[in-house]
Structure formats: C-alpha cells, structure tokens
Image (cartoon, helix red, strand yellow):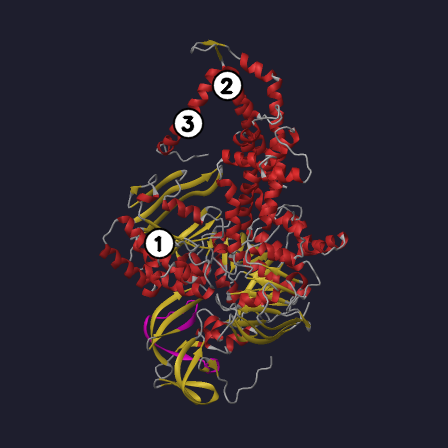
Amino acid sequence: MTLTLEGVSRVVNGQTHIHPTDLTLEKGTMNVLLGPTLSGKTSLMRLMAGLDRPSQGRILWEGRDVTGMRVQDRRVAMVYQQFINYPSMTVYENIASPLRLQGLDRVEIDRRVRRAAELVRLDDDKLRRKPLELSGGQQQRCALARALVKDAGLVLLDEPLANLDYKLREELRAEIPRIFAESGAIFVYATTEPHEALLLGGFTACLWEGRVTQFGPTPEVYRRPADATTARVFSDPPMNFLRAVKSGGVLRAETGDELPAAGPLAALPDGALQLGFRPDHLRIGAPRAGDLAFEARVAVTELTGSESFVHLDHGASRWVALVHGVHDLAPGASAQVAVAPEHVYAFGEDGRLIAAAAYAAAA
Amino acid sequence: MNKTVNQRAWFLVLPVLLLVGFSAVVPLMTVVNYSVQDTFGNNQFFWAGLEWFEEMLASERLHNAFLRQLAFSAIILAIEVPLGVFVALNMPKRGVWASVCLVLMALPLLIPWNVVGTIWQIFGRVDIGLLGYALSALGIDYNYTQDPIDAWITIIVMDVWHWTSLVVLLAYAGLRSIPDAYYQAAKIDQASRWKVFRYIELPKMRGVLLIAVLLRFMDSFMIYTEPFVVTGGGPGNATTLLSIDLVKMAIGQFDLGPAAAFSIIYFLVILLLSWVFYTVMTNLDAQESRK
Amino acid sequence: MARITLAQLAHSYLKAPSGPADYALKRMDHEWEDGGAYALLGPSGCGKTTLLNIISGLLRPSEGRIAFDGRDVTDLPTAERNIAQVFQFPVVYDTMTVFDNLAFPLRNRGAEEDYVRRRVGAVAEMIGMTDALGRKAQGLTADAKQKISLGRGMVREDVNAILFDEPLTVIDPHMKWELRTQLKALHREFGHTMIYVTHDQTEALTFADKVVVMHDGQVVQMGAPEELFARPAHTFVGFFIGSPGMNVLPARVAGAQAWIGEHVIPLAGDHAPQERAEIGVRPEFVRLAGPDEGIPVVVRRVEDIGRHQIVRAEHAGREVNMLAPEGQAVPLGEARFAFDPEAVNVYVDGWRVPARDEKETAR
C-alpha cells in the first residue's frame, strides 16, 4: 500500500500554496511534515486527504489514480489540533460513530471500540462520560481512538499535540507510534517542532514556503540536510551560519576572521561557502587544535538548570551555543567560542549542501 | 489560475435554481409582461412599450411616495441601529438574566405583522387605546388619524418596537464572540468605557452590524402591513409609503400596467440601494484594514 | 516596579469550602522581590492561572491579602493596580495602527504626546517593529501581534509588575527563540518585576530567576533553575522538570547507601535509615555500568533526538531512562545502569530528605 503524489501542486487565487511535489509514502510508516506555520503542511494534508483537488498532478493510491475522488470514498482519518469530538455523545459513542456509519453489527462495533479504547488508555469510566468532562489529553485520546477504529489506510494528524500541556504532550507523543504500530496504515503527522519529528522517528519531509525541501528517514534528514533551508527548519535552536570564502588552506569569513580549513574542511572546493553548525556543537572556551575559533559578544544567556543557551552576536549574525551546565555569562561580555571542523556543514552560495559534517557522514 | 472543475456540483444546486425560478423569476416575468402592456378589461392587452415606465418616472405621486419611503427608512435606521447596539451592550452576558432578556427581545419578532399593526392601531386610539387615552388625558393633543406628524410618530415608534430586537440580537451575538482577554487588556490599559466600545466592541461588531443595517433597510423599504393596518396611508397621503401606494394603484384602481412598471422600478431601486450600501460598507472595511 | 507580598493567601471557588480539596489555591506565604523574573510553572489545573488572576485583580482571593511594596491591594480593581498583562492569544486593537496600539496605555493615562512618541519609539525598537509603526494592526501575523502585546505591556515605565499568561503558545518554535530572548533583554533593560505563567518547562527555566513550581493548588518548590534541576524538592518537580523527567525508584536507605532490592546504590551524603524511601536520579546522570555496579535493566528503545539519545529501559517493571551522547552505540536488551552518587536524591512520602551532612544551600 502506497500513497504517491506526482507533481502535485495547488494554486489558489493566483497564490501558490504548494509547489509541484513528488512524494511516495509507504504502508505502516510514520511520515512527519515539518515546517513553520503557513509552510504548507495543512495544504499538503488536505490534498492527500482529498479535501482539496490539486491544481496539477496526480495522486495515486496503491498505483490507482484517486485524484478526483471524494474524501468520503477514501479510507482517510484525520485528527486535528483542536480536540474535535461530538460533545453530546459519550466517549464510547464518539469512538463508535465511524463504525455505525459503516453499518457494522453491534458486537463487532463493541469489540473494535473497546480495543481502540484500550490502545489509547481510556478506561470504562471514561468511555461512559461526555468528552467535555475529560481533560484535554483524554479528549485528544478520544479523537485518536476514533481515527483508529476507522481502519483507515491513511491517517492524517495535524499538530495533534499542539494544544496540550508540555508534559502531556511528551506522554502522548511517546505513545502515538505504539498506538498506531500495528494498524499498518500510512501516517502523516504535521508539526512545527523539530524535536517532535526526531522523537517520532520514521520519515520526515521538511517544508518551506510550500515546497518540500527534503524527504527521507528522519535521522538522515537531520544529519544530512540537503540544503541550508532544511538545516534551518530542522534545528531547534536554529543552526548557526557563517559566510566564508575558501582559498587553499584558509577560510576567510565575511567578518574578517581567518580560519584554518583543517581536517575534513581541507577537502572542500575553493570559493564562496555558507558554513553551518548546530548550537550543541558550538563550544564556549578555548579552541582545540584545528577548531574554527571566534570572538563573539554575549547577547543573552538563558539557563535551564542543566544546560545554558548562550546567544551570541558575531558580526551581523546571531548565534546560539547550547552548552552543558550553568554558564551565566554577562551580556555584552566577549566570549571565545569554537567549533570542531568535523561538526561543520558546508553549503554552496545557492544553499545546496556541498559536504555534510564529517561526524554525521560517519554515523 | 486553475479552478477545481466538478460538474456534479450543479446537480446539487438544481433544486434551488428550480425553486427560485418558480418563486421569483416566473412572477417577476408576469409583472414585466404587464408593465409593457395596456388593458381595458376583458383580458384584452395592447402593447404599450415603455410608456408606463415613462409615466411612472415622471409621476409626482411616485416621487412623493419615494421621498416618504426614504425618510421613513432613514429615520428608523437612525433610531434602531444605535438603540439596538445600546441595548445589546447593556444586556447581561451570562446567567439566567441573559436568557430572560433574549426571550423578551425575541417576543416582538414572533408576532405576525398584521397583528402588530392591529395592536398599535388600538393602542394609539384616543377613545379606547391605552396610549392614546393616556396621552390625551395628559393634555397632549394626539391623534394619529388626523395629524400627519402623530401618524408618522406612531408608525415609527411601532417599527422601532417591532424590529429593534433584531438589531439587538445580532449585535449581542457579535459582542458575545469577543474573548474576555480583550476586556481584561482594556481594563489593564485603563481604557475608558467609550474607548472599549470604539476600539474593541465596535470593530468586532462591524460584520453583524452590516447585516443588521442591510436587513433593516430592505425590510423597512418594503414595509406594508403594519402602517397599512394602522393608518391606511393617511391622513391624506401622509404615510403612504411606496408599497402602500403600489397596492392602492394595482388593487384599488386596477391600473395594472402602471402598477407593474412601478413594481419593477421599486424592485430595481431596492436592489440598487442595497448594492450601494453593501459596497460602501465593505469598502470601508477593506480600507480600514489596508491602512 | 514593586515587591509582591502574598500573605496567608488562599482561594476557593466555592462559597463554603469544607476541606483542602475545595481550594483551587492552598494557603501560601510568599515574598517576591522587586525587579525579579518569576515563572509559575505547572500542569493545567494546578492553580497557576488562579494565582495570576489574583495578582492582576481579576479575582479577589477568598482568604488572605496581597500587597505591592507593602501597600495592601487586595480590594483594588485591576485598573488601579498599575500592572500590565500579556495574554495567551495576542490582544491588539485591530483598527488602530501599531503606533496607536503601543501608545494606548500611555494616552489613556494622559501622557504628553512628546513623551508618548519617545517611549513608543524606544519600545518599537526593542521589539523590532519600528518599520511597522504606521501600519494597521489588523492583518499582521500572530507573532507580530504578540510582539505588539509585549510592547504594550512594556511601554509604561511605572508599572508595578508585568504578567505573562502563556504568551508564546501560538508562536512558532523559531520565533519563540527570538521573542524569548527579546523578553529577557527587555527585562534586563527596564528591570520590571515580571511574572510568567506557563506549562512549558523550557520557557519557565530560561525566562525566570526563580521558578515557582505548582501542583494541585500548592507551591511545591520555588527556586533557581539549577536548584530545581539538581535538587527537586518533590518527586513531582523531578518528574515535571526535565524531559524525560527524573527516574524514581523505591529503595531502602541507610548511611551513605541505598538498596534497590539487593542492588547497592552509593549516595554522596549520610542519611538516616529509611525502610520505605525512594531515590530519584535524572537521566542526565545515568550511565552504562560494568557487571558489578548499578542495577540490571532491559533496554526497550533508543530514541535518537539529534543532540543526544534517550535510552528507555525498565527495571523490575519500572521505567528507567538514560541520556546518551549523540553517536554512542547503545544495544537493546539487558544492560546495567549506574548513577552518579552526587546526583542521587532521597525522597520520603514524595518530599526530598536532605542528607544529615548536607549544607543549607545559600539562595
């Protein structure tokens, strides 16, 4: 079972919501759509569901063209950011509603409802209540169960945890892969948060301004971003960038720094580059041999107790260093920061990846 | 630009089109038919061309009725919209009293129009009506059957009594959709009551007020039953509004041709004025947001 | 700017509360310093919003007093408390320009137009909206609107306190970084007393000097982020702060040792004997151990979340998690975990018991 988008695009009133997109999603996989608000996540989901018709291109389901097919005729389930349940029905009836529409007999409905409820951990007491009497997390569990019982081939989850408390989000997020593990459907999960994509695993499609910038196994997209845009979207805190020109063994940064192109950086082609490195690879303190070392000015320090986010100004760019422990640096102070050459990504001027960081290539 | 093409959708609209066809287009066409013909009875018709239209457009009688109609609509809009908003602002937001107020507000809307007319016809009579009797007992010379001003005041008060509720309900719905945070923020910003109204409530009510104004305008422009029952268009022609005049002409005098032409002009005027209202108000809206 | 005193403060939404369960806010005494940055952190329904509403004056506490700089304000309405508040959803006056929005609180207090212009200019600069000052607020993006809300809160110099009610809920992750650091910089610049309500630990920890953790209507711990991280006063704090939260295991304690079953766990301090205690240790301080130390576990899952890995394991049916650095290979199946003795806390009935020789922390 596969869902294939072939050159699918969507244009509304002359505005391109989705640029032509090719995407193939396989049975039983979790596919994360990662991108900021208005990057096209929901538009893409609506196309997959059949709620909208593509302006161009075809949508294939198991090789069969379903482009114009109505959403009612497809086996699609959807869970939204808002907890959408029928407020006047009990939780049990809510979960049973799609089955009643399918006209199954009572015994079969009961069997499936109880199974789904067990998977999402709603006990008998909760089943008897009305959704609004439950907590936000439980309401969303009810919506998830309704999507589950439908036995849909395609389950679309549009930021389902965004309205939940942080800890509840953590709890339900860990459960979602387990809940859906055996259903064998294709899952599509939209989120704005990079660490949510990483926790869910599976595959990730990065979206930016209506374009899928990269699609692949999640850790690979994270460690080998195809371009600077993907790297920026898939990094929280955002990736740090530095423009530089390489000639021979020297990198001349736009800020005037002259840096050694040591280790894996020596192999880069000469010319203009965008260097990128993640906040957790930027160290505060004296450089080691071969490191790219900078003088930066501390803008703000945020302490979480276990880690510190040090926001730095270097030239015109704002960088973030994520370091272990408590480093309460005074704003305005100057700090020595360094990054090891094996943690540096190199992008071309057009943003395309030239070389992934050496540590990631080895992993 | 690529539009989604789905021909099947037309089938869904078809029943509506048929219904509208029967209920609106066919009668309208009959009227058009009459408006370009003349008859001397016996079901014999002659082609009259645009004669009736020319006559009607030049008719002072129609001009006067039109001016009266405009004045009537303008006055009731000027009273009902601010009054409705004012009442809505002062209604309780929640609790039992909110429901009680809503029911009370809805009551006048539930009364059939000719009954409203009858109520006020009796209410205002000097001999047996509570209002008329009370006023004359107070020494006020009030008689809507003889004094044109009194007649006007009576039908305006009646319309306000009957229809302000609609504005109230719409405005109330608009007010209820404003999140509490806005009021809290305004308190914290120390905004005066007037500023809360001007910068929070009014902007959030604009959409429903547009609908309220349109509805009230169209309805008042076509009003017939209530003033007819109360004053019958009198005294003299003082309260002969467009629709009353039209009926007088069509049924009282059986001038079908002129009446038909009159109807069409009437219809077009309403269409035109509504359109003007709508575009002006939505444009204002768009300008506001573009600034 | 003001010092905030909560004296014998409690609140119940019921007319005649009969027991502690009827209180949304249980009795508390607190003194919050002038110019401090405080965060109220807790799950939905923990009472943090009730407390915020009491401070802002939207709610009158059923018991106790609240004072600003020693002046009793319990019976003062919101408008007279001289505070500013930023809400979860951006509140802007749509029909006004950005400038007029920012100027609104000043003009309402009859400030001179000269001063208004200067002040609005300064705030607009801080929130980076100088270019948008002439625009209508309607039609701006959610984060721009929220910036205006922040700016409106900041514009008055004489406020007693600025309250934030989950202000970043509707903001994209990348924008969150920007707004958060801006907020931090604004606090440094203007020195307002700030109170920030959130369920998001990262926001609370990075924003505040002092985090007030609330649970079930009570303040369970108030402390600096590093205290909450290193020495959670209650197992709830350990669970709620950190992701994943602290591992909690039942144990026997005596002297400088704890026993989980027959496995010996060395402790850093000297403890009075306790038969029914629990030990808590954060996943950050768990490591893979040799055959003769720590506890046996079964590793169920390893989650690659980019900069580190969450190793989810089980010991005697209880979840035990470990954080492993990026790239370290952790095989599934049987393994042993050992804990850093310095980072092991001892709990009895949920509350932390300091070691007999533990020094009082000076804060």
Instruction: Please state the chain letter of the residue tagged with numbered disc 3 in the rendered image.
Output: B
Please name the amino acid that badge 3 sits on.
Ser
Q: Residues within 10 Å of mark 2 (few under 14, many from 20)?
A: many
Q: Secondary structure at mark 1?
A: strand
Q: CA distance from mark 3 to mark 1?
A: 50 Å
Circle 2 residue:
B260
Instruction: Tell me: residue B100, above or below residue B59.
Output: below
Q: CA distance from mark 2 to mark 1?
A: 65 Å
Residue A249 appears anywhere in the view:
no
Instruction: Tell me: residue C3, above or below residue B239.
Output: below
Q: Is residue C44 magenta?
A: no
Image: magenta residue range: C321-345
Q: Secondary structure at mark 2?
A: helix
Q: Secondary structure at mark 3?
A: helix
Instruction: Tell me: residue A358, above or below residue C274.
Output: above
Does residue C43 appear to the left or right of C157 in the view shown? left
- Pick whichever, B218 or B117, lies toward us: B117
Please name the amino acid that badge 2 sits on.
Ala
